[in-house]
């Protein structure tokens, strides 16, 4: 199984809603990532979990809250988002975190904030 | 400018070769990578090159690395319509916090 699965594929939410994005991998990878991608732009790193501990937080606003319940799962909790947060949110995993660029990406969750 | 720059757009005819270029400021990366993103999808690792190599060939893909000029390129031979996508180079950039930095991306359009 070489897949990273993300749900939901599409999400529309209002600025007062609370929702979550979910990501799952069963490759035994110990690092998991959240990226934000705007149209025609490169992905921007948001968070990295390494061995289920948050190792990188790229100064992301607190309305985004990551959670890593176990080594296979990664969640992104969303609350009080702004319209400019509308984007494709990509989850990725890798065997380790240090000096590796071999990331396996999910298909993404396309978020629209009204 | 950006740490990792690419030209925005490339259009080629089916069957021709495509060359996508990437320049970077400074890299501490052991490897440099090329990713492909098809419309509406996530990124897929295409190939990578060890930083002390000049060239790597992988079927239709050839990666060239010029460390002196800090220039990386991806050549796709016999380009097909299925190669239409956005291509990102990536590496760990010195002073970038030990994280992977993606280039600005090149949209490749393959015409019949």
Image (cartoon, coloured by chain):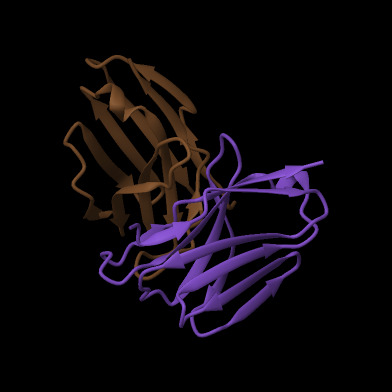
Chain colours: A brown, B purple
The residue sitting at 56% across, 34% down in the picture is B40
Q: Is residue A103 left or right of residue A86?
A: right
Q: Is residue A2 above or below residue A18?
A: below
Specify the quadrant that holds the N terminus of chain B: bottom left
Image position, residue A9 (x, y; %): 49, 28
Q: Classify B75 as above or below A108.
A: below
In which quarter of the view is residue A94 placed?
Answer: bottom left
**Image position, residue B2 (x, y; %):** 35, 57
Q: Residue at x 56, y 39 (%)?
A: B41
Where is residue B26? Give x, y as percent.
35, 73
Against B21, residue B27 (above or below) is below
Q: Determine the image quadrant of residue B25.
A: bottom left
| Residue B62 figure quarter | bottom right
- Residue B20 visible here: yes
**In the image, what residue occupies the spot 30% across and 44% down?**
A69
For the C terminus of chain B, the image quarter is top right
Q: Is residue A72 left or right of residue B35?
A: left
- Report whether residue A29 is seen: no
- A104 above or below A76? below
Asked whether, in this view, residue A28 is left or right of residue A51, the answer is: right
């Amino acid at each position: 199984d070489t897949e990273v699965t993300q749900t939901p594929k599409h999400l529309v939410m209002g600025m007062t809603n609370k929702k979550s994005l979910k990501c799952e991998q069963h490759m035994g990878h110990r690092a998991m990532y959240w990226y934000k991608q705007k149209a025609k732009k490169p992905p921007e790193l948001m968070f990295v979990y390494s061995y289920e501990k948050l190792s990188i937080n790229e100064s992301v606003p607190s309305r985004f809250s990551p959670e890593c319940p176990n080594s296979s799962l990664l969640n992104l909790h969303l609350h009080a988002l702004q319209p400019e947060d509308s984007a494709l949110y990509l989850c990725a995993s890798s065997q380790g975190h240090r000096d590796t660029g071999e990331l396996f990406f999910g298909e993404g969750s396309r978020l629209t904030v009204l | 400018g950006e740490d990792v720059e690419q030209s925005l757009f490339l259009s080629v005819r089916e069957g021709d070769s495509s060359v996508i270029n990437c320049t970077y400021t400074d890299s501490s990366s052991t490897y440099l990578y090329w990713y492909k993103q098809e419309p509406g999808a996530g990124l897929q690792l295409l190939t990578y090159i060890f930083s002390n190599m000049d060239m790597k060939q992988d079927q239709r893909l050839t990666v060239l690395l010029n460390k002196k000029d800090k220039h990386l390129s991806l050549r796709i031979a016999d380009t097909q319509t299925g190669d239409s996508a956005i291509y990102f180079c990536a590496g760990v950039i010195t002073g970038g916090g030990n994280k992977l930095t993606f280039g600005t991306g090149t949209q490749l359009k393959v015409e019949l």
